[in-house]
Image (spheres, coloured by chain):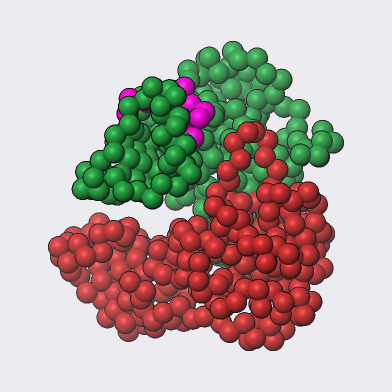
Chain colours: A red, B green
Amino acid sequence: MENYIFGKNNVLELLKNSDRNVSKILIMKGIKESGKIDEIIKLSKQKGIVFQFLPKEKFTQYKEYLHQGVIAYVSPVKYIQFEDFLSKEKIYKKIIITDGVEDPHNLGSIIRTAVCAGFDAIIFPSRRNALINATVEKSSQGAVNHIDLIMVNSLSFTIDKLKDNNFWIIATDINAKDNYYDIDYCNMNFAIVMGSEEQGISSTILKKSDFRVKIPILSKFDSLNVANAASIVIYETVKQTIQKSGNVV
Amino acid sequence: MENYIFGKNNVLELLKNSDRNVSKILIMKGIKESGKIDEIIKLSKQKGIVFQFLPKEKFTQYKEYLHQGVIAYVSPVKYIQFEDFLSKEKIYKKIIITDGVEDPHNLGSIIRTAVCAGFDAIIFPSRRNALINATVEKSSQGAVNHIDLIMVNSLSFTIDKLKDNNFWIIATDINAKDNYYDIDYCNMNFAIVMGSEEQGISSTILKKSDFRVKIPILSKFDSLNVANAASIVIYETVKQTIQKSGNVV
């Protein structure tokens, strides 16, 4: 299930903006030909990609996915090597790190927000965390093609390396004293770490962080979804960036 | 599928904090007895609620839900009448309105954030929007029991009524000029309106709004998930509330 993309928007996004190889596209016979389907067909022709109209029955094997009658077979997403990311030249880099986000919808949703916010990379461990699969791609609405995806074996080692390379590590932690908006995110390289919904960030990573921040809760019900929590912190960085630069976006 | 709650956390939340009637609780035989299961059993005994251990096979009918071996049969969630909500005494009220949020996961997730942020109600139309069902409850992690749920037939009429009652209507709209953080959310009643992912807010509602705000995007990829977008705006109100009051939360 690694190598296909489903859903009208996702397939369209893939054809428009990704350099991944598409081996073929399946379209359900009799599907209501919306503008998007027309565009998918047009782009496939332009790019010389095989597309097939198949009867509804052939799609039952994909029934657990919201394919909307469109599926593309693709080469796997490209992971970037951590070292290659570090060596890229940029004034300041912004990273999101997930430490134990196991729900693929949440991972995809975090990637989606990170891309909208102009982040450069997402780093995630190869164990105890969702990896990039078809569900992540779908939830990201294709955002996985717009950010460096870095899978690492040891998050702890990676964080040491980031610190050596002039990154500030910001951990989100419900027990933190500072609120997420108390940090100045401008004019520095930073990595924001999000932990698992159940256990938060592992203690090793928490100890290595330069800042710990919390999202304040105004009720007794203390239970933000991790993708929503990530969005809140990520967008504080956007707001500060725009306000400091004086740009109206 | 309206009237049960599934998942360990949700059932526990229900037993602890809800006044809904629970007719029975089903627990899967041989389930790993975590602290949470013990607590569910203990609370059921205290409250005189029937609980049954059933073999795994009996749970296949619920297989599309992440029940984790625990299901509670409950009375439906209680909706609040719009007029009753208006007549409640409170200095300032905060509302979230969804206009066409059809994905139950997103609706549940928005409710979850709204409750964490101390919002008083969610208002949604009876058509073209998800209603409160088991998936919404699960995604909300039980937050539906901590906020006034107001279903209305006409959102347009409801917004007129809100304005008559001294509420400011804030619409999120990608074409807005102002950013979401340009509004002063303190010292007023307000309702934030979130539209559908595909079409945004309907034009009638948009016209009636007092403010239109956008979430700025720092890349070419302009596609925030609606629950994440809601979280970003909702938390700007929290931040302003805390900063104005001078309270450290």
Which quadrant holds residue B26? Answer: top left
Image quadrant in which the N terminus of chain A is located: bottom left
Q: Is residue A223 left or right of residue B38?
A: right
Residue A88, horizontal then vertical, whole percent: 68, 84
Left or right relative to B166: residue B30: left
Vertical side of B144 occupied by B83: above or below: above
Give the camera-side residue of A65 and B137. B137
Does residue A95 appear in the picture of this structure? yes
Q: Residue A100: give x, y in percent of width and height.
A: 54, 63
**Residue depicted at 61% across the width and 40% down the height:** A222
The answer to which of A185 and B198 lies nearer the viewer is A185
Queried whether the magenta region covers residue B159, the answer comes back as no
The span picked out in magenta is B13-24
Q: Is residue A119 above or below residue B181?
A: below
Residue at image coords 40%, 27%: B45
Q: Quadrant of the C terminus of chain A?
A: bottom right
Measuring from the top left, give residue A168's x and y in whole percent: 77, 69
Residue B141 left/right relative to A33 = right
x%, y% of residue B63? 27, 49
Q: Residue at x 82, y 36 (%)?
A: B247
Q: Is residue B105 visible?
A: no
- Residue, far right: B246
